[in-house]
Amino acid sequence: MVRKARVDMKRKAPAPLKLGITELSPSLEELHEFIDWMPYFNAWEFSGRFPDLLSDPTKGPEARKLWSDTQTLLKQLMDEKWLAPKGVIGLFPARSLGDAIALESDDNNQVVLLHCLRQQKSREDLASHSLADFIDERDDYLGAFAVTAGHGIDEHIRRFEADHDDYNAIILKALADRFAEAFAEWAHKKVRCELWGYAADEALDNEALIREKYQGIRPAPGYPSCPDHRLKLVIWELLNAEETIDVTLTESLAMWPTASVSGFYFSHPQSRYFTLGRIDKDQIEEYANAREESIDENETWLAPVLGY
């Protein structure tokens, strides 16, 4: 039997200081402070912790060369403003409806439903989580965001490729990805401290941000807590992201430009990331029915998490 997680709604965050849509266009200098460099080195197949790996007796020389080359290109990128970060966030009234979340959008108080999945394969002594558990049944709020650091990159990628300089082309693409993730971190802090304001006194350095020591989470569609990429369609509907920041979704719901990040903001202090795990056919049937779609369509989109 699935046991729903207990969340103390007396501890939920207060109402946001600024409801609705906010557009963001931070400078590269602002975002640079929020970069987590470890995933950058992971992308180049370096293991270990940054900056320790720079002094590693085996990996150090190659890692230091990459770091030096990266800093050279990074300086030029920032000095000449190759990238133009753009983002949009929205904070909306919300309430939970079982395993779904109802949001009131800016569009004439239209109600948008966000259907969530629940863990099925859990130990008997542990509760099964759904993102809907972190939203109260009334008088609560949920955020959504989409940010990109990919605008402006194409002409420089084409120039590198025309010169057969694949190395710097790859560095530039990886840097754009790091700026997009830094943008997501920067925007989340702005939400916590200013726009929602439930953590106005937060004083965390970048290391603490990387370790997610703040209150709240920002789960992204396609990741373990919400593996259904179609939840991006809800974000795009709420934020009008294609028109506002010129980020589109492909047929497979990948974001374009690729150096883009989107997701939701949950503020409850007990909200946490979790891995959904495998789900059984009865939940697929319930989920498809709630979305008013065929079972086959949902099995296709959720194939990676099917337990049958």
Image (cartoon, grey):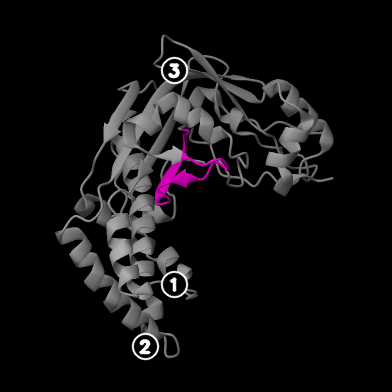
Of 157 and 303, the residue lying toward us: 157
The disc labelled 2 sits on which kind of residue?
Pro
In the displayed structure, 282 sits above or below 32; it is above
Q: Find residue 105 and name its label.
A: 3
Residue under circle 2? 61
In the displayed structure, 222 sits above or below 111; it is below
- Label 2 environment density (alpha carbons within 10 Å; few <14, some 14–19, many ≥20): some
Which is more N-terminal, label 2 or label 3? Answer: 2
Which quadrant would residue 207 be assigned to in this image?
A: bottom left
**Element at badge 3?**
loop
Residue at the top extreme? 108
Residue under circle 1? 49
Which quadrant would residue 214 be assigned to in this image?
A: top left
Q: CA distance from mark 1 to mark 2?
A: 15 Å
The disc labelled 1 sits on which kind of residue?
Arg
- The image quadrant where one finds the C terminus is top right
